[in-house]
Amino acid sequence: MLRQTARLAARRRATTTRAMSTEYAFDEPKTTSNWPRTKANTLINVVPQGEAHVVERARQPYDVKGPGYWVGVPGLDAIAAVVDTREQTIVVPAPPECLSRDGVGVDAAATANVCIVDAEKARHASDDPAQKLAELAGLLVQKEVAALSTDELATKRSAVEAAVKHQLSNDSAPASWGLEVRNFTLAALTARNDEERAQAQAALAEKQAQAAASVQRVEMAREAARRDAAYAHEAATRETRILADRVVALAEAEAKATKVRAAAMAAA
């Protein structure tokens, strides 16, 4: 009797746990990522201001609930994602390999103001959309910085900011993540340190010296080839003249011999 009572109690606890879970009974864990954030369906669910609940019914997209409360059937309805719809200011880190045109490492202090406007699209993103946008903005900053020399960093900051802002506004990726980019600010654009700058300049000077030496070697080889060609032409011309003189001398000797033979025949 005690064993049967314990078995029934364990079965009731398991049933209650399944009903309160955000996963369906026939669901399997899909990912270990922390995105999207989920929440248990408690029958009467409250959505705070600045949030949205993406609701699925029987594993199919059903509705997006805004601030307020809504009633869901545990085991049938699930809160697939809890999305923060407030405007966020995110820090945009420059990638470690962010280099200027002359090879100096560059640090960029940038921020972006973003807001999730489509919770359903954000829920299907593989990671936090705001974090993905920060990575995209960092790559765009890296691309723009690569076209500048170190001396141009201070004067071209506004141009880089405007270019990155334009590209973020026209890129299709943020919209596919349910994001709206409202602003982008590039507060600073500086070389990492003087030592690294000096090393980069020394490396650049060495490359330029190597290039100049290579050009000089090519010019010397070209001059040597030109001299060899001129000498070969002169030698060929001299040999041709000698051969021609020999042919003329041979022809004259043959003519003289012919005259001698003719005179001898006439005398006979």
Image (spheres, rainbow, N blue to C red):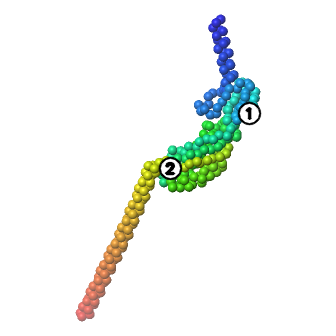
Q: Is residue 121 visible?
A: no
Q: Earlier in the sequence, mark 2 or mark 1?
A: 1
User: Spatial distance from mark 2 to mark 1, Cα to Cα?
Assistant: 46 Å
Provide the secondary structure element on which disc 1 rests.
loop
- Measured from the top left, where is residue 139 in percent x and y? 57, 46
The N terminus - image quarter: top right
Identify which residue, 181 or 262, lies in the foreground.
Answer: 181
> Which residue appears at 25% of the width and 89% of the height?
260
- Nearer the observer: mark 2 or 1; the answer is 2
Left or right: residue 268 versus residue 160 is left
- Measured from the top left, where is residue 212 in percent x and y? 41, 61
- Measured from the top left, where is residue 216 in percent x and y? 39, 63
- Name above or below for residue 259 compared with residue 219: below
> Which residue appears at 63% of the width and 8% of the height?
3
Q: Amino acid at mark 2?
A: Ala
- Name above or below for residue 243 compared with residue 205: below
Snapshot quadrant of residue 29: top right
Residue position marked by numbered label 1 in the rendering = 67
- Measured from the top left, where is residue 197 in percent x and y? 46, 51
Residue position marked by numbered label 2 in the rendering = 191
Left or right: residue 197 versus residue 78 is left
Q: Residues within 10 Å of mark 1 (few under 14, many from 20)?
A: few
